[in-house]
Image (cartoon, grey):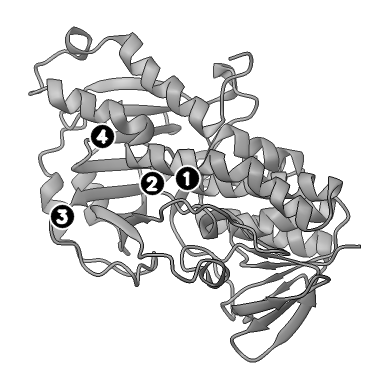
Amino acid sequence: MTRILIAGAGIGGLTAALCLHEKGFPVRVLEAVEELRPLGVGINLMPHASAVLHGLGLAEALGEIAIRTRCIEYRTRFGHVIQSDPRNVEAGFAAPQYSIHRGELQFLLLETVRERLGKDAVLAGKAVQRFSQSEESVTVYTAEGGRLECDLLIGADGLHSAVRRQIHPDEGPLHYEGTMMWRGAVESDVIADGRTMVIAGDHDMKFVTYPISERARRGGRALTNWVAELRRDRPRDIEDADWTREGTREFIESFREFMMRDMNIVSLMEATGTITEFPMVDRDPVDFWTDGRVTLLGDAAHPMYPIGANGASQAIIDGRVLADTLADMPGPEGLLAYEAARRPATAEIVLANRRSGPERVLDIAAARVKGPGDRIEDLISAEELEEVAAGYRNTAGFRKQGG
C-alpha cells in the first residue's frame, strides 16, 4: 500500500491524515514543534468544510465545543447593518458554519488521528527540511538529522513551507498590501444572540468579532474572539510573520470612533490579556504544486488573506479531495489529478480575497454612508448586496443546496 508522509500537523495536515486513513493508506504526520499546544484564537469553518468533518464522524464533537454560527452581519463603523448573511442549515446549507478556537479544533483533529491511526502517527520535533526522490520513493530529511522513506510526501507545512520552497526555489517574497491585524479572545457577556459574527468598518479600518466557545455559551458567558485591522503606509518587515507574536496596544485608540449598539469594542480589546499581531499576507498563486511524488496542501499551497474565513476551510477540502483522488490513482498521477481539481479553484479564492471577497459590501457602504443618520436602504439595494454575497459563495464553493 502507498506509504504517505505529511509535513505539518496543522488543521489541513491532520484532516488529510484522517481522510487518507479512511481510504486505507498508511500515514504518518511530521510536526516541527517538540510539543503541540492549543495555540491561536478564533477561526471559522465554512459549511462545505464542516461537511467534510461531519463525514469523518466529528459532528457531535464539534457541536460540543464550537458555536454554530447563525449569520454574518456586515456593518458600517456607525453601526448600520449593511447585510445579514445567514450561514446555518436553516438557510439552506448542507452543514453549519462553525466558529471555534483554532487550538481546540487542532487538538480535536490530533486526538482523533491518534485514536484512529495510532499514538505514534504524529511525530513531534520532526521539522521537514528537504526531500529527494526517485521514480519509486521519496526520502525526507528532517532538521535534527533524521531521514524517513515514503512513497508520497504531502507538504502541509504552512506559510513558510520548506516543501514549497524546494519546489519553487525562486519564488518571490510574501505579498503584503499594508494591513496589520491584531487578534485576541476574551471572556465577556454574551453579545446579541451569541451566534452572530460581526464585521464592521471598511478596507482601511475593520473590526471583526464572534463567539468561539459553545461551552462558555451554555454557561451564560461568551469567549469572544476579535480581530482589528488597520492599513499602514510603512509596513514593518513581514518575512518573519508569526501569528504568535505579541502585539502592542496603541492601535486601540483608532477604534474609539466605532459606534456599535450592542458592544463596546474598545472595552473588549482593553480587557484582553494577550493580543497578537500579524501582517495580512498571502502569496501569488503558482503554476504547479506537484513535483513527482511530492505535492502541497493548505497554506503551503495557497496562503490567502483571512477574508471570507476560507483559509482553514480550503485546507480541509484539500485533504478530502486528495484522499478521494489517491483512492482512485494511488501514485504521482493521483497527485496531479488532485492538483488539477484544487489549484485553479484556490487560486481564484486567493485573488478574490485580494479584492475583499464578500467584504466588498463594506467598501460599497463606506463610499455612500457618511454618518449615523443615513439609511442603508436609501443608498444601497438588497440586490446589489446579494450579488456580492452570492458571487463569493460560488467562488469559494459553499453554495446553498439547490442553489
Q: Residues within 10 Å of mark 3 (few under 14, many from 20)?
A: few
Please tell me whether mark 3 sits on a helix, a strand or a loop: loop
Look at the numbered discs 2 and 4 and tell me whether their residues touch, using CB distance below 8 Å.
Answer: no
The image quarter containing residue 174 is: bottom left
Separation of disc 2 and disc 4 at Cα?
15 Å
Single out the mark in the foreground, 4 or 1.
4
Q: Is residue 161 visible?
A: yes
Q: Which mark is residue 212?
A: 1
* Relative side of 42 to 264, left or right: right
Could you tell me how far apart the alpha carbons at marks 3 and 2 are, in whole angstroms? 26 Å
Residue located beneath label 3 in the image:
232
Per the image, label 1 sits on a secondary structure element best described as: loop
How would you rate the neighbour count of disc 1 (Cα within 10 Å): few for under 14, some for 14-19, many for 20 or more? many
Q: CA distance from mark 1 to mark 3?
A: 29 Å
Q: Position of residue 207 (x, y in %)?
A: 26, 42
Contact check, label 2 and label 1, Cβ < 8 Å? yes
| Extreme-right residue of the structure | 1
Q: Is residue 67 visible?
A: no
What type is the residue that disc 1 sits on?
Answer: Ile
The image's mark for residue 61 is: none
Position of the C terminus by quadrant? top right
Q: Which residue is mark 4?
A: 200
| Label 2 environment density (alpha carbons within 10 Å; few <14, some 14–19, many ≥20) | many
Question: What percent of the width, then of the height, locates residue 241?
Answer: 35, 67
Identify residue for label 2. 224
Q: Please name which of the two marks, 1 or 3, marks the residue nearer to the observer.
A: 3
- Amino acid at circle 3: Arg
